[in-house]
Image (spheres, grey):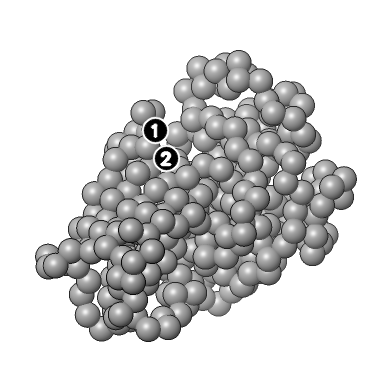
Amino acid sequence: MSENPQRITIQTPAKINLGLRVLSRRPDGYHEIETLFIAVSLFDVITIDRRSSGGAILTWEEGREDLNPGDFVVDESNLILRAVRRFENEIGRHVDVAIHLKKSIPVSAGLGGGSSDAAATLVGLRAILSELTGRLDIERLAADLGSDVPFFLGPPAAIGRGRGERLTPTVIDLTWYAILICPRVASPTPAVYSALDLTCLPKMPHFPARLEGDGFFAALALIHNDLQDVVERRVPQVLHWKNRLLTLGAEGAYVSGSGPSVFGVFRHKPDPTVLDSIRAEGVDVFVVRPLDTKSTMVIGLS
Ligand code: C5P
């Protein structure tokens, strides 16, 4: 590894939420939640190259043939560019970098793809511009960018509290597979939270500190996403997919985050022909596994 790397490549994953409790509505408009974030084996790849001038530019390509290019927008609302601006603001100067994104995580799907990209951007900028940044606290910048962004800076399983940014790393069983189904329908997070009736939420037990072995599978029966009913009302096919996953033998099936993605947890590797039949109904579908690495991101410098 050279002292001043010119390029950094980061493979950064999607997350699923295995359960999400909404505890209260806060004066700042956010909700106090408790959720188990799990990074899974579906990745975007971000490459950042230093350049001598010209500021920051972002280009992207599809990592999968079936990603609808209209879904991904490159403007100042894009979380990668917002991460760059937040970083520039913090160090007090513009940065000259070319960022390229290979996008495989479905957009606006409840899988944290944008948050993962933003976290990787902060990690990449800090690594490649270390002479400008010193000991920059990117955790704080990450939390400013979005509630889910800090998770991607840490280990691949963590309980998120507060608005999701207060994290406690946790140990989970890693033997399972998930079928992840992503309907190509928007399910905007603010609309889902604001449609939630906090007076009639089921009481779910607090997440245990460890969820290993049979304890993991036993806990699946108790796990619930409080946003699920709202998402099912807004996107009726979510209920169809949840039931389909249960019929296929899932130990549990849940909406991830504010949806509309639905995943089913399986003890064994699902048969590929099952995926073909799901895909034929016009949704994106993946088999993913929980990451067994120390951190969510895989980083290469050159
Ligand atoms: O933090 P983030 O920008 O991802 O949040 C998007 C929106 O989702 C917030 O503006 C808020 O409406 C809603 N939200 C919430 N409570 C949370 C997380 C998000 O109400 N814990």
Dot 1 amino acid type:
Arg
The amino acid type found where label 2 is placed reads Ser
- Would you name the residue on which mark 2 appears? 104
Q: Position of residue 132 (x, y in %)?
A: 29, 80
| Residue situated in front as seen by the camera: 81 or 63 | 63
Horizontal side of 103 relative to 19 (left or right) equals left
Q: Earlier in the sequence, mark 2 or mark 1?
A: 1
Instruction: Please tell me in which quadrant of the rendered image residue 49 appears.
Output: bottom left
Q: Position of residue 8 (x, y in %)?
A: 35, 59
- Residue at 20 percent across and 75 percent down: it is 94
| View extreme (front): residue | 2
Foreground of the two, 126 or 222: 126
Q: Would residue 18 be seen by someone viewing this image from the given angle?
A: yes
- Report whether residue 263 is seen: no
Depth check, front residue: 182 or 80? 80
Reading the image, the residue beneath label 1 is 64
The image's mark for residue 294 is: none
